[in-house]
Image: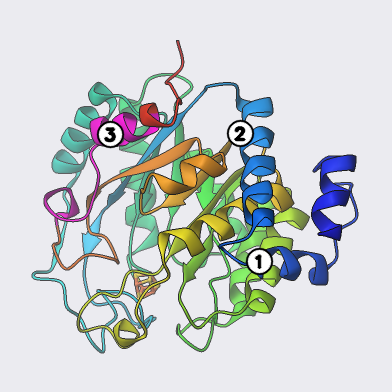
């Protein structure tokens, strides 16, 4: 296959020319053909060459379980179809206790996530309190609704080092957020000097290579160093549940193409954690606690969420280890 030949010969640097058609061709590779395994091999070798055997576990805490006005059609907390079993907001004491437990168990970065309507000033206060608990140098990442340049600077001042923010697939159609709003927040993140964590998500069976390529190339353009790909979980009761989910093989292909095209400097993730994409060079997994848009249990650590120990065990199966 011509694109693979070219990448194998010329490397996968961000300066290597790649068109949308090239990316789409990689995303179309038949899953039972030899070129699919060349793709995995290229992606796996790319990660090993950069990361050695260094693995990462990031932990995300969902700070509130409440109906969200953005009403995303894949999310258990969309206000038009709320299917989580309860509603609550974590208080600071509970949050800090949870953070201490995750740090003790062993994680690299801590993420705090809220629904889009959660008050941003309250979030800043929680962030400051969490920052004070974290070991020096541990990254703290915000995963919240869209925000202004002023709020982005406020996040920095509160001690956040980065933000998870993306333009989701079919943004504005399957979600209540205009793509332009997501793009404005992405600019604010960069301008404030926050590190950007990006993901191709939530990938479902209906998303074609053209749609995936747009977001993969956006991440490449943004120079993302913590990259991910996530398949949509068909949460019962959500509007998109009937569309089902892509297979592990299909997800592995998306992961491999994303890793090759974006070429992140620090980590490549698959979500939710499964082993197969580790073959394509995934070196980072998420532990999750609290509310989770893919779960109906509002304490996802008792449901779909992995603990750090479980995430490290899966990474070890792929030969990825914590910092020594
Ligand atoms: S995915 Fe996020 S923005 Fe969308 S409904 Fe759920 S909490 Fe709100």
Residue 308 disc label: 3
| Residue 170 shown left or right of residue 16 in the figure | left
- Magenta-drawn stretch contains 305: yes
Q: Earlier in the sequence, mark 1 or mark 2?
A: 1
- Label 1, label 3: how many angstroms apart (C-alpha)? 31 Å
> x, y percentage for residue 245?
37, 73
Q: In the rendered image of this protein, does residue 181 appear above or below residue 53? A: below
* Quadrant of the snapshot with the C terminus: top left
- The 10 Å Cα crowd at callout 3, few under 14, some 14 to 19, many 20 or more, is many
Q: Earlier in the sequence, mark 1 or mark 3?
A: 1
Region rendered in magenta: 299-315
- Label 1, label 2: how many angstroms apart (C-alpha)? 23 Å
- The 10 Å Cα crowd at callout 1, few under 14, some 14 to 19, many 20 or more, is many
Tell me which residue sits at (61%, 38%) in the image.
44
Element at label 3: helix
Q: Which residue is mark 2?
A: 266
> x, y percentage for residue 213?
69, 69
Q: In the rendered image of this protein, does residue 79 appear above or below residue 55? A: below
């Amino acid at each position: 296959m011509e694109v693979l030949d070219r990448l194998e010969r010329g490397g996968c640097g961000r300066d290597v020319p790649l068109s949308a058609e090239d990316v789409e061709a990689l995303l179309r590779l038949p899953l039972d053909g030899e070129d699919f395994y060349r793709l995995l091999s290229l992606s796996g070798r790319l990660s090993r060459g950069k990361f050695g055997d260094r693995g990462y576990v990031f932990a995300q805490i969902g700070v509130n379980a409440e109906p969200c006005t953005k009403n995303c059609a894949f999310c258990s907390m969309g206000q038009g179809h709320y299917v989580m079993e309860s509603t609550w907001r974590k208080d600071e004491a509970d949050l800090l206790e949870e953070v201490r437990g995750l740090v003790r168990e062993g994680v690299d970065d801590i993420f705090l996530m809220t629904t889009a309507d959660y008050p941003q000033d309250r979030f800043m206060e929680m962030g400051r309190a969490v920052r004070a608990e974290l070991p020096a140098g541990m990254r703290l990442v915000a995963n919240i609704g869209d925000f202004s340049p002023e709020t982005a600077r406020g996040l920095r001042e509160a001690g956040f080092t980065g933000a998870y923010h993306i333009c989701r697939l079919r943004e504005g159609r399957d979600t209540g957020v205009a793509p332009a709003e997501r793009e404005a927040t992405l600019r604010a993140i960069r301008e404030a000097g926050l590190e950007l964590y990006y993901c191709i998500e939530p990938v479902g069976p209906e998303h074609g290579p053209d749609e995936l390529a747009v977001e993969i190339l956006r991440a490449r353009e943004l120079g993302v160093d913590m990259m991910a790909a996530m398949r949509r979980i068909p949460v019962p009761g959500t509007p998109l549940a009937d569309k089902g989910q892509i297979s592990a093989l299909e997800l592995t292909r998306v992961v491999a193409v994303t890793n090759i095209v974006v070429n992140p400097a620090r980590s490549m993730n698959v979500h939710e954690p499964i082993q197969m994409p580790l073959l394509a060079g995934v070196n980072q997994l998420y532990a999750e606690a609290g509310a989770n848009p893919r779960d109906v249990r509002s304490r996802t650590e008792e449901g779909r969420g992995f603990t750090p120990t479980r995430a490290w065990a899966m990474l070890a199966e792929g030969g990825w280890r914590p910092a020594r």
